[in-house]
Image (cartoon, rainbow, N blue to C red):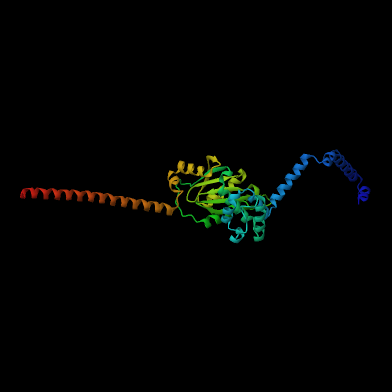
Amino acid sequence: VWERRLTRRPLAAARLKASAGGLWRRRRRLSPAVEGGSAASDSVLAAGARQANVLEMDGSEYMVNVLSRFRMVDFPNLLKSWDILSERQLQSVDFTRNTKKDLIVQLAALCKKNGVTLTQVADLEIIYNCRYPQKRRWGTYQMFNSNGVEEATLFDFEVFRKKFKKNLKMLIRNIMVNIIEHGDAVWIRIAWGKRHSPPNQQRASFAVYYPQTPYVFMANLAAQFRMYVSQALVVATEHDMLKELDLRGHCLYSLRDIAFKRFNPALSVHHRKPLQQLNSSQDSGIVLFIVSVHIILIVIAVKVLKVEHCRAEFLRIILSEKQK
């Protein structure tokens, strides 16, 4: 084929030879550094390999990565909250005598046996962040309505979850969204992917939404994705816009209390107590008031009876003196 090209198209063949010669000379000039294995090229290749491993991570590998962040004392409680391993499997694991490395290997084997998925491990990472929210830096956001009135509506977790996922996946498709309800807040985890790569589990964004309030707290959210999350949140919560407040820090619960107290003092008092707890405290206050009133009446009655008794005794003494 090369000889035919030379004979049929001499000008094109000459150009091809010249370009090939230039590439060969450039390759010869670079060959000593490549053959010597420079540290820079090795580090670039290693970084690329690590990124490829992260993007192609399966459930077991990702679980090892998540479990390595745990403290030894946290394993039993967090795994029970996760509710993927059975009670019998948890009892078969010795959390006191094993080293952390052996414990993680044993738990990863159990999860692989159960067929754990990336979605389930992402839920475990949310549980870990619920336990240690100070590991991330949070920003505070407030949602508004166009009429300026915050309407009180009943919160349905399933409706919110479906609306948020649907609207976010309409805006950007290559993502993985996990939403769980923990305490009085809704925790959201979003792993972002590119056009030709799966979602990156190591750089996920987190959002914490407090139902029946206009406040959301977000961490590790890139500026390019902020618009998508804002749009999905305002649609799922039936608001019109979302605005960032000048409140940032690692202590999530302090940020929550400051936001509630500054912008709506009633929330800082009542939001941390469930409705049943508030009702029980009100009932106990009423009962205490009634008991106090009864005690006061009894004391007054005793004093009145004493006065009457003294009066009757005084009259009896006077009558006896008169008779004498």
Q: Residue at x 87, y 43 (%)?
A: 20
Residue in front for this viewpoint, 99 or 199: 99
Residue in front for this viewpoint, 276 or 142: 276
Lateral position of residue 294 relative to residue 82, left or right: left
Is residue 220 depicted above or below 110 in this figure?
Answer: above
Res 220 → quadrant: top right
Residue in front for this viewpoint, 172 or 90: 90
Q: Residue at x 36, y 50 (%)?
A: 285
Q: Is residue 169 visible?
A: no
Res 217 → quadrant: top right
Residue 135 in percent (x, y) is at 59, 44
The mark tally for this picture is 0
Extreme residue toward the front, this view:
324
Residue 181 in percent (x, y) is at 53, 54
Residue in front for this viewpoint, 174 or 266: 266
Lateral position of residue 297 relative to residue 80, left or right: left
Residue 268 in percent (x, y) is at 45, 45
Q: Residue at x 58, y 50 (%)?
A: 74
Q: Is residue 101 visible?
A: yes
Lateral position of residue 150 relative to residue 101, left or right: left
Residue 50 in percent (x, y) is at 72, 47
